[in-house]
Image (cartoon, rainbow, N blue to C red):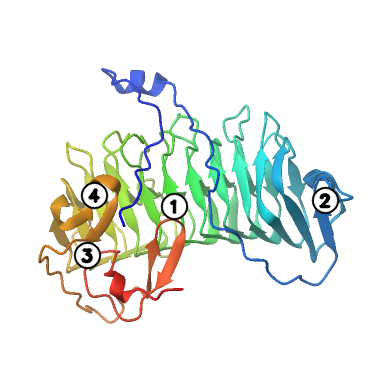
Amino acid sequence: MALPAMGLLRDWLDAPSPAERRRTVFVVPPVPELAAPPVAEPPVLEGKVWRVGPQEALLSIAAAAKLARSGDTVEVQAGTYRGDVAVWGQKQLTIRAVGGRVRLVADGRSAQGKAIWVIRNGDFDISGFDFVGAKVADKNGAGIRFEGGRLRVAHCLFWGNQNGILTIGNQPDSQLEVVSSEFGYNGDGDGQSHNIYVGRIGRFSITGSYLHHADTGHLLKSRAAVNEVFYNRLSDEDRGRASYEMDFPNGGVVHLVGNVVQQGRRTENSVMVSFGAEGLAHRRNTLQLANNTLVNDQPYGGTFVRAAPGTERVQLTNNLLVGPGGLQLPMEHTDFNTRKVDWSAFVQPARYDYRLNDSGMSLAYQGGQAEAAVPSAQYVHPLQVQRLNGPPVVVGALQPESLLTRP
């Protein structure tokens, strides 16, 4: 079945100069009623359970943030909580929505002038929340501001904030994991704020997530030492005006596997994946792309992947490129089985359905070098990852339906 069109922004007028385009009002559409799949109820962990809701002893999340101790669990009843911002300083905490989704609307408020939630130097597991509309004076208002430690975010929505998730500082021991979450319409229009901005942390991973329509900034920007971007959809679609789809400005170790990446025709920068543009700052600087589908709808061309000179290794394996443009890679790189096709190879590209059609297109999968990544799953819209029941049989991110293992 074809995917629904996702262009939700109001039409904006073409302007004769980039400066005038940036002055165009960026209209954030209404928050979707259902932004992510329901969250399965996990088992109760050790420690005290603090319950928040209209019928509970705690009426606000901010109160729970002050009372909870390390090792506890905070359960928030489904509903909308306006201006209920919080700083979390525990060493270990689980925070989860129960009974449905919890929508956190900033309503002009922020924790410490930073974010809806500030997470500090602990081990946090957060699931089932929508973070909406965080804006502060320095234009770095975030749904979540991550200030070190370990953070796992699952089944969450970040919508219309200046930054969806923002990490700060040089935190080489910190880790951020994002699972099955959606980031849309984040950014302040200045090109310095993004759907996700990951600072100098040790490891960043994102799986099964949907990133789209950043306001002039990037869909994803990461300075982490190790980056694992597996089985996601990053698509700016028809009316988006994001810059890079993925930016790794200081290099690092980057693995991009099984992603659907699409650049819209109104992009602010025609490069889709950028590596090392601000200088290679890590001990290891390698870029690997395996079984990704990269679609460029910018009519005047562009660059699918650009890596800075001096990159230790660039390896491309079984990727599918669609649209005008090429690759800007160091002279020493490995490119195995990259294929370039026309939009006619897909089921319904106008609706962002990039499964290969039945027109006789034969793109046989080949194993390549021993160290090449071989995907074991694929992204299924919206916000799902389904395992494959065998090795991939076609180039690109999306395999035939017969290869998917149904839940």
Q: Secondary structure at mark 4?
A: helix
Q: Position of residue 402 (x, y in %)?
A: 29, 74
**Distance of mark 4 from mark 2, alpha carbons?**
47 Å
Query: In the displayed structure, does residue 58 sit left or right of residue 388?
Result: right
Callout 1: 10 Å neighbours few (<14), some, many (20+)?
many
**Distance of mark 2 from mark 1, alpha carbons?**
30 Å
Determine the image quadrant of residue 361: bottom left
What amino acid type should be assigned to the residue bearing mark 4?
A: Pro
Q: What number is the disc on residue 236?
A: none
Q: Secondary structure at mark 1?
A: strand
- Residue linked to disc 4: 349
Q: Position of residue 3 (x, y in %)?
A: 34, 52
What amino acid type should be assigned to the residue bearing mark 1?
A: Tyr
Query: In the displayed structure, does residue 11 sit left or right of residue 198?
Result: left
- The reply to whether the C-beta atoms of the residues labelled 3 and 1 are less than 8 Å apart is no
What amino acid type should be assigned to the residue bearing mark 2?
A: Ala
- Residue linked to disc 3: 333
Callout 2: 10 Å neighbours few (<14), some, many (20+)?
many
Q: Residue shown at 21%/70% (left/top)?
A: 394
Farthest residue, direction right: 57
Q: Secondary structure at mark 3?
A: loop
Q: Of label 4 and label 1, which has the lower sequence position?
A: 1
Query: In the displayed structure, does residue 323 sit left or right of residue 37?
Result: left
- Residue linked to disc 1: 210
**Location of the N terminus (image quadrant):** bottom left
What amino acid type should be assigned to the residue bearing mark 3?
A: His
Callout 3: 10 Å neighbours few (<14), some, many (20+)?
some
349 in relation to 9, above or below: below
**Distance of mark 4 from mark 1, alpha carbons?**
17 Å
- Residue linked to disc 2: 64
